[in-house]
Amino acid sequence: MKPLEEIEIQKPVLHPGDLVSKARLLFKEGQCMELPVVDNGKCLGTFHELVLHNYEEDVILNPMDFKNASIASAGDEIPVLWRKFMENQCSTLIYQDAEGKFLGYITVWDVVKIYKQVLGIGESNCLLVLKLRKMDYRLSKLATMAEEAECYIIHSFIVQASDREVIYLNLDLEGANPEGFIQTLERHEIEVERFLCRTEKEDVLQERYDMLMSYLNV
């Protein structure tokens, strides 16, 4: 499944000189965490939604807050894209041609949507991504820990990291207390790479987790 064929990559972008008010609107409409900043057909980097907390509405975006963009290739399959999202700790991947001209972008939510369609994951479920060494992978143990936190692993799939000794274990979770499961994992020193949940019920938890991860990655 090729992302350029299956995913709409022509989405709204930011430009140098845009106001914070425009960025807030685009983030709200696009439901993404990072937007590319494009000037004269070139991507200057990406701007993260969490940075908006430092701005007033009528202020121009500061280029100092643009971060280096993570790049996807036209031939990348979905597992490769997923690995790039995890290893680059980003939520947006940029497409460009051989001359560096900006073509468009995809978000981690685009890929989650495909996984939900292909694997039949429930729309209300959350996706928890763990980073594990292969030798430490024990799904039965994780399932027991989840149930103790009143969560249930409905589906799981693995994407191998560039380091062949490491995997990204993706857990499709159903339950009212994913935060409790995450806390249990942390107590067992199991690395939580990403928490993806877009239900209204979990908006606060999602925002809190995103802010925590942003802080830890600074």
Image (tube, rainbow, N blue to C red):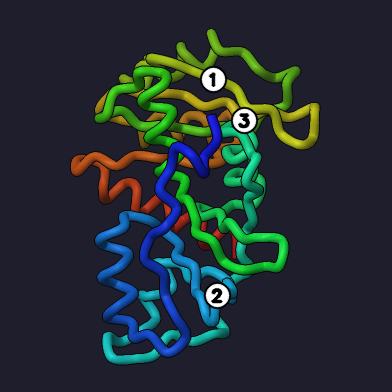
Looking at the rendered structure, the kind of residue marked 1 is: Phe
Q: Position of residue 107 (x, y in %)?
A: 46, 50
Measure the C-alpha gap from mark 3 to mark 1: 8 Å
Q: Which of marks 3 and 2 precedes in the sequence?
A: 2
- Residue pictured at 41% horizontal, 69% vertical: 13
Q: Which residue is mark 1?
A: 157
60 w.r.t. 154: above or below: below
Q: Is residue 135 left or right of residue 132?
A: right
Q: Position of residue 43 (x, y in %)?
A: 57, 72
135 w.r.t. 218: above or below: above
Measure the C-alpha gap from mark 1 to mark 2: 37 Å
Measure the C-alpha gap from mark 2 to mark 3: 34 Å
Foreground residue, 214 or 104? 104
Q: Residues within 10 Å of mark 3 (few under 14, many from 20)?
A: many
Q: Which residue is mark 2?
A: 41
Residue 4 in view (yes/no): yes
In front of the other: label 2 or label 3? Answer: 2
Q: Extreme left residue here?
A: 200
22 w.r.t. 94: above or below: below
- Residue pictured at 60% horizontal, 22% vertical: 158
Q: Quadrant of the C terminus?
A: bottom right
Q: Which residue is mark 3?
A: 168
Looking at the rendered structure, the kind of residue marked 3 is: Tyr
